[in-house]
Amino acid sequence: NAPVADVAFVLARTNPEAGKRGMSIFIVYCALPGVTRGPKEHKLGQRSSQVGELHFADVELPADSLLGVEGRGFHMMMSVLEKGRVGSAALAVGILQAALEASVGQARMRRQFGQAIAEFQAVQFMLADMAKDTEAARLLVRAAAAKLAAGADAPAAANQAQCIAGDAAVA
């Protein structure tokens, strides 16, 4: 949400020699001198979730800007991304459900050769595939969310849910 954010959580290298263990998260107010916004990215879907770049030039942060423990930023960020993937997949399921309902409505309303196109087997196959993909994505999202709610790590489940739901929503 960089194009509209007042505050950003920034993952930065604080110890380059330590690899991913040398990264920390900082709370950065976007109005600070040296913080500028890049252009808003144009996305194919989920446009209500705005994406863009933040640029930093000689930004000075107070010591209390560090979020958590220095060097644990990568671990913290991956935990947040896992939850974000499930949220993104849930949005895709909503898109799938809305598309399915609109398609069924259109198939029932549109007439061709004296009958609703919903009566044609080819259209029924397409609607069945949409319903199958929607339900599969929904079940994957629920499974991933249940693992997270139980306090378990769920990187594979979150990735599968996002992949299947996202692919189906743009197919």
Image (cartoon, rainbow, N blue to C red):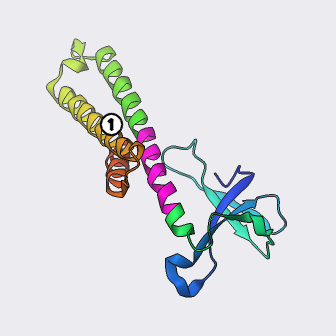
Assign a secondary structure to mark 1. Answer: helix
- x 63%, y 63%: residue: 68
Looking at the image, residue 14 sits to the left or right of residue 134; the answer is right
Q: Residue at x 32, y 17 (%)?
A: 110
Q: Give the range drawn in magenta.
A: 77-91
Residue 26 counted in the magenta span: no
Q: Give residue 6's position: percent from left, percent from top.
A: 75, 51
Q: In this view, does 149 lie above or below 19?
A: above
Q: Residue furthest bottom?
A: 17
Q: Where is residue 138 in the image (x, y as percent from the top left)?
A: 32, 36
Say if 149 sits above or below 64 in the image.
Answer: above
Q: Mark 1: which amino acid? A: Arg
- Taking depth in this image into account, of 168 and 71 the one nearest to the observer is 71
Q: Residues within 10 Å of mark 1 (few under 14, many from 20)?
A: many
Q: Residue at x 46, y 46 (%)?
A: 88
Instruction: Answer left or right for 63 relative to 104.
Output: right
**Magenta segment includes 89:** yes
Of 11 and 166, which appears nearest the observer? 11
Image position of 108 (left or right of 66): left
Q: Mark 1 points at which residue?
A: 138
Quarter location, residue 2: bottom right
Residue located farthest toward the top when viewing the structure as drawn: 114
Rendered image quadrant of residue 123:
top left
Is residue 83 visible to us here?
yes
In the rendered image, residue 38, in percent from the top left (x then y), is placed at 69, 62
Considering depth in this image, is 125 or 148 the residue closer to the camera? Answer: 148
* Rendered view: 163 above or below 96: below
For residue 171, say whether it is visible.
no
Q: Which quadrant is the C terminus positioned in? A: top left
